[in-house]
Image (cartoon, rainbow, N blue to C red):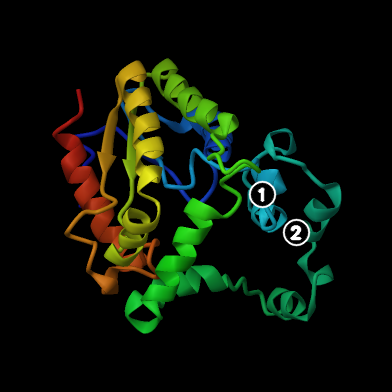
Amino acid sequence: MDYSDDLTCFNFALGSQRLSYDTRLLKYYKDLIEPNGVVYIVVSHHSFFGVPEEQEEQFKAKNVRYYDILPKELIKDYSRKEAFLIKFPVLTGYLSIFNTLAGKSINIEEEKWASETAERIDIGQSAYSAYSSYIKQQQFDEKGNRIFNQEEIKAINEMINICESIGAEPILVTTPFLEEYNKYVHELSPDFYVDFYGLIDEIVDNKHVLYLDYSEDERFSDSYSLFMNADHLNKEGARKFTDILIKETIGYIK
């Protein structure tokens, strides 16, 4: 569906990474955003809390995804060695050698996203794993207090400022979750919502931006065919959600 007559430009800040990386992406590609465009800033449950991502076990694996889309000065803990291996994948293993010689680039995660549905997995285990990752693991200090990650909180404010500087409309969005995930959060960590929505409300009030919360949207919360797991939409779900988001955004734009 073409919405070009209603909105000049749609730009999605992906939510799988931290806000501090979303900021780097927006800063580097901001010249591609047209005036009066829309920038969706995805705010997930992992966005504001926890230790700096450089301290996380999976940081190195996640970090290399930006090597081809950002200049090295915008990449956290940039490694020349990692950059070299990415440029020359035949050095990283037999599968890479085969794919390179065959002229193929196989992205297992992309294939999974396109084909998997939550109907085929243990959704209870998936939901608890997501809950543990977002709400429990590395989220508290030694005294049991939730860690408010100031770098990430600063990042979302910086993104809003960048949008305003180029004449774009920033909209904060929380994407849908399955009901099993939401149930764990409500039952095991109800205090999380106080901290999460407290920060959201503060940002909305101070920056006068729109926040759209689809985390418990009934159009998605029990639709397992639209999810890859408890907290990630699959390709079909992403298409449906994008269509809904664009339609409902049109009614809010100034």
Q: Position of residue 191 (x, y in %)?
A: 38, 43
- The reply to whether residue 91 is visible in this rendering is yes
Describe the element under mark 1 as helix, strand or loop.
loop
The one nearer the camera, 121 or 196, is: 196
Outermost left residue: 251
Q: Is residue 31 left or right of residue 28?
A: left
Residue in front for this viewpoint, 187 or 89 = 187
Instruction: Where is residue 109? Give x, y as percent.
Output: 53, 69
Q: Is residue 28 visible?
A: no
Residue 86 disc label: 2
Looking at the image, do the residues carrying marks 2 and 1 touch, with CB atoms under 8 Å apart?
A: yes
Residue beneath the point at 40% across and 30% down:
199
Question: Label 1 sits on what residue type?
Answer: Asp
Q: Residues within 10 Å of mark 2 (few under 14, many from 20)?
A: some
Q: Is 63 left, or right, of 85 in this rendering?
A: left
The x and y percentages for residue 231 are 39, 61
Q: Secondary structure at mark 2?
A: helix
Q: In the rendered structure, which amino acid carries the disc numbered 2?
A: Ile
Q: Is residue 92 above or below residue 136?
A: below
Q: Earlier in the sequence, mark 2 or mark 1?
A: 1
- In-image side of 57 versus 247 (left or right): right
| Crowding near the residue tagged with mark 1, few <14, some 14–19, many ≥20 C-alpha atoms within 10 Å | few
Q: Nearer the viewer, residue 78 or 185?
A: 185
* Residue 150 sits in quarter: top right
Depth check: 199 or 62 in front? Answer: 199
- The residue sitting at 32% across, 24% down in the picture is 204
Q: Residue furthest front?
A: 143
For residue 68, which numbered disc appears in the image?
Answer: 1
